[in-house]
């Protein structure tokens, strides 16, 4: 099977799963009520949510720079921010493809090797997963009697993608370790072949990126950004409760629960968490005493508000990144032409 057909099957399957989950979630939902939900919302809180969202993305871009700097690469903040936002946009269309496109764009724009950038991105995903697991643990300890059985049942039934994500991450980590070991004690036959040297080089760069956290120069700042990203994730969801009178009273712990369940839903291997986010967050509202229909309406409102941020901001950043890359390539070609002319004259 060709690579094109493989990608078509993979992304097509992901899209079909998302559609099936959305169909399941919206069974019996009156679409007129969905429109009414958005019409009566206080949009000041949507703007506040968008601000918190942009702050989280800016913090992620700055944290990425902290990982790249000890490796000898110093991209501009603008390039890091716009490629991060572009990755979110791409992920809405092709799940998990955004990370690869992000590495490709930073390579074309700022000459950071793709394999090195990918290593840092994998490290970021491992850190995010550990943060999510830590937050789940905090919630279990705080209110295990109430939310423990519910969360475990939802995770078991609705989000098998988390296990896949964890296995994939561990597999990539193992592959990086294998490449690193091979680079230290390479087989003679690998050294003799061009493809072997290329594989070893890619593996070495990947491993350097994955263990770059050990060389971060300002580690307290790295920890701050890691915590700040998740604080902004919490804030961008929590403030949306104030968009409606009937949800304005919901407290901190419920917002914390929505953060965790929404994070699990977004981690599922479907476009933008479609379906999984709606079911998990709606389940949280149902646990709080709302009807499932009310939960779906609120989950749809929250997911759509946050997705619009990615569509508008990410779309703009993608266009900006492509324009900047094109201009960089033109300037590079012009500089090469001038160098050739100067050498010819000399």
Image (cartoon, rainbow, N blue to C red):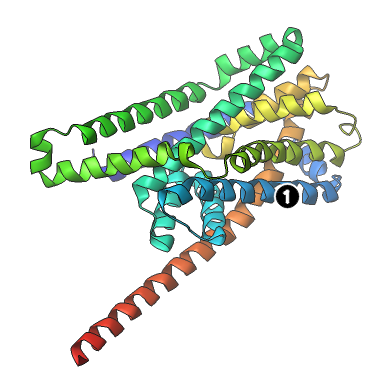
Q: Quadrant of residue 327?
A: bottom left
Q: Is residue 239 above or below residue 268?
A: below
**Residue 112 left/right relative to 204:** right
Q: Quadrant of residue 191?
A: top left
Q: Quadrant of residue 209?
A: top left
Q: Is residue 15 visible?
A: no
Residue name at image x 8 percent, y 36 percent: 189
Q: Is residue 227 above or below residue 76?
A: above
Give the x, y percent position of residue 8.
36, 42
Give the x, y percent position of residue 113.
35, 52
How many discs mark residues in the rendered view? 1
Give the x, y percent position of residue 143.
76, 13
Q: Which residue is mark 1?
A: 50
Q: Quadrant of the N terminus?
A: top left
Give the x, y percent position of residue 14.
46, 34
**Which residue is the extreme one toward the bottom?**
345
Q: Nearer the viewer, residue 197 or 294?
A: 197
Residue name at image x 29 percent, y 40 percent: 204
Q: Is residue 40 visible?
A: yes
Q: Kindly state the secondary structure of the residue where label 1 is placed.
A: helix
**Circle 1 Cα neighbour tier, 10 Å, few/some/many (<14 / 14–19 / ≥20):** many
Q: Quadrant of the C terminus?
A: bottom left
Q: Nearer the viewer, residue 16 or 146?
A: 146
Residue name at image x 57 percent, y 20 percent: 158
**Residue 244 left/right relative to 206:** right
Residue name at image x 27 percent, y 29 percent: 178
């Amino acid at each position: 099977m060709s690579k094109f057909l493989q990608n078509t099957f993979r992304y097509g399957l992901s899209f079909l799963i998302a559609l099936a989950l959305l169909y399941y979630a919206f069974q019996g939902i009156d679409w007129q009520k969905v429109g009414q939900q958005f019409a009566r919302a206080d949009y000041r809180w949507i703007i506040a949510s968008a601000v918190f969202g942009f702050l989280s993305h800016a913090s992620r871009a700055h944290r990425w720079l902290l990982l790249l700097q000890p490796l000898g690469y110093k991209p501009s903040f603008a390039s890091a921010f716009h490629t991060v936002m572009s990755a979110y946009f791409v992920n809405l269309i092709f799940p998990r493809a955004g990370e690869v496109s992000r590495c490709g764009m930073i390579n074309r724009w700022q000459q950071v090797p793709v394999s090195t950038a990918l290593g840092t991105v994998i490290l970021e995903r491992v850190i995010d997963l550990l943060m999510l697991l830590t937050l789940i643990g905090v919630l279990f300890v705080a209110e295990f009697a109430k939310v423990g059985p519910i969360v475990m049942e939802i995770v078991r039934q609705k989000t098998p993608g988390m296990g896949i994500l964890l296995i994939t991450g561990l597999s990539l980590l193992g592959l990086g370790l294998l490449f690193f070991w091979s680079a230290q004690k390479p087989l003679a036959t690998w050294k003799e072949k061009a493809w072997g040297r290329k594989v070893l080089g890619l593996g070495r760069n990947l491993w350097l990126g994955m263990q770059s956290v050990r060389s971060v120069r300002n580690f307290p700042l790295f920890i701050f950004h890691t915590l700040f990203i998740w604080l902004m994730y919490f804030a961008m969801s929590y403030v949306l409760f104030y968009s409606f009178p009937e949800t304005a009273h919901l407290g901190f712990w419920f917002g914390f629960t929505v953060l965790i369940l929404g994070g699990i839903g977004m981690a599922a291997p479907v476009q933008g968490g479609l379906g999984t986010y709606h079911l998990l967050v709606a389940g949280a509202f149902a646990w709080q005493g709302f009807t499932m229909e009310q939960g779906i309406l609120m989950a749809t409102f929250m997911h759509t508000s946050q997705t619009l941020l990615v569509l508008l901001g990410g779309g703009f950043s993608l266009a900006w990144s492509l324009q900047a890359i094109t201009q960089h390539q033109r300037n590079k070609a012009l500089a090469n032409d001038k160098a050739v002319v100067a050498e010819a004259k000399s």
